[in-house]
Image: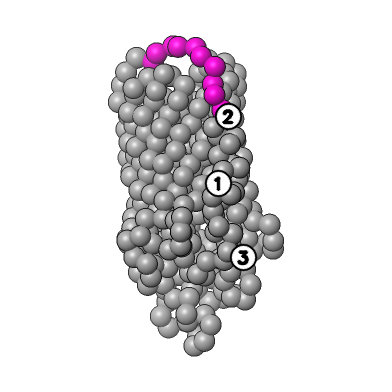
């Protein structure tokens, strides 16, 4: 699978960082894991109704491209980002492309509170999801052909910096995200744009974030999370369901923190065959 990733622009409002020290309350995020597992039904959904795009833009302007940092954003500091993401042959069976090309844009906004909490939201739109009409044989695979682009799944969540300040050598944070299946709400017959059109039309993810400040300008971040989603099965038996997510990213800040060079490795692994472990390597830049 060949992937091309492009970040258009990110920006954040300027403001004074409030330095208020208080104990992080992470119980909500720990409880989120248990509540989601009981909230989301475990029956298998329609095979084509899942989010094919493995890339999901990071939540704040100071994060990497995909990998999140453990830093806060500052009290009442607002940030917004726009991502464009292109993938070539993101879904294949043997040598046959099921989805030949995909182009997705996403708007992500974030707001810092009390110099410890960040709330964020993102809404993607799939401009292109198309197959190669000449390559799909008749039968089972032809039923998997994409039906075109449209609205993706809305996400909303929060991050709490649990330990460490900006000038410390390391920081830890917890993050929780809810996914609302707006793709299926907008189009009940959608394929590959989001979660299935089945109650409660929700998914979620809980993550532990860690950042190591190697120097004033060089930062190494790791993410480890659990993704909750309804199980679907693609012929001839590849399963897509709950998954362990992981990521590692290096950020090098330049030009008084106005430009960041970024290298990242991330992926998700299910609880079955190797075909359920998509992984990607990214290199890019971010201006803010």
**Mark earlier in primary sequence (3, 1):** 1
Q: Residue at x 43, y 63 (%)?
A: 197
User: Which corner quadrant of the image does residue 118 belong to?
Assistant: top left
Residue 288 locus on image (x, y percent):
35, 31
Q: Earlier in the sequence, mark 2 or mark 3?
A: 2
Secondary element type, mark 3? strand
Residue 185: x, y in percent?
35, 60
Q: Residues within 10 Å of mark 1 (few under 14, many from 20)?
A: some
Q: Residue at x 69, y 61 (%)?
A: 272
The residue that disc 2 covers is: 27
Quarter of the image for residue 74 reads: top left
Of residues 283 and 269, which is closer to you in this image? 269
Q: Is residue 117 left or right of residue 214?
A: left
Q: Locate residue 13, reporting x and y percent.
A: 30, 26
Structural distance between the alpha carbons of marks 2 and 3: 31 Å
Describe the colour scheme in one phrase. Answer: one colour
Label placed on residue 239? 3
- Locate residue 263 relative to residue 277 in the image: left or right: left
- The residue where tag 1 is placed is 36
Q: Is residue 8 visible?
A: no
**Residue occupying the point 34% across, 65% down:** 187
For image coordinates 51% across by 47% down, the residue present is 204
Q: Which residues are magenta?
A: 17-26
């Amino acid at each position: 699978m060949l992937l091309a990733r492009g970040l258009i622009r990110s920006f954040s409002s300027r403001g004074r960082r409030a330095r208020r020290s208080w104990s992080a309350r992470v119980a909500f995020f720990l409880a989120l894991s248990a509540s989601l597992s009981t909230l989301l039904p475990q029956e298998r959904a329609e095979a084509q109704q899942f989010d094919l795009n493995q890339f999901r833009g990071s939540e704040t302007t100071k994060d990497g491209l995909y990998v999140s940092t453990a830093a806060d954003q500052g009290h009442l500091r607002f940030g917004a980002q726009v991502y464009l993401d292109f993938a070539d042959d993101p879904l294949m069976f043997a040598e046959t492309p099921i989805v030949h090309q995909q182009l997705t844009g996403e708007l992500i906004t974030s707001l810092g509170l009390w110099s410890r909490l960040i709330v964020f939201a993102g809404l993607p739109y799939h401009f292109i999801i198309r197959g190669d009409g000449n390559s799909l044989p008749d039968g089972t695979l032809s039923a998997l052909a994409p039906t075109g682009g449209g609205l993706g799944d809305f996400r909303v969540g929060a991050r709490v910096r649990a330990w460490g300040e900006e000038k410390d050598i390391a920081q830890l944070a917890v993050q929780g995200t809810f996914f609302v299946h707006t793709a299926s709400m907008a189009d009940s017959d959608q394929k590959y744009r989001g979660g299935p059109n089945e109650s409660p039309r929700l998914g979620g993810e809980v993550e532990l974030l860690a950042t190591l400040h190697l120097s004033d300008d060089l930062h190494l971040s790791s993410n480890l999370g659990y993704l909750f989603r309804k199980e679907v099965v693609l012929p001839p038996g590849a399963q897509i369901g709950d998954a362990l997510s992981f990521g590692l990213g290096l950020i090098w800040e330049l030009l008084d923190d106005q430009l960041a060079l970024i290298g990242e490795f991330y992926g998700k692994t299910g609880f079955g065959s190797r075909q359920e472990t998509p992984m990607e390597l990214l290199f890019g830049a971010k201006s803010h």
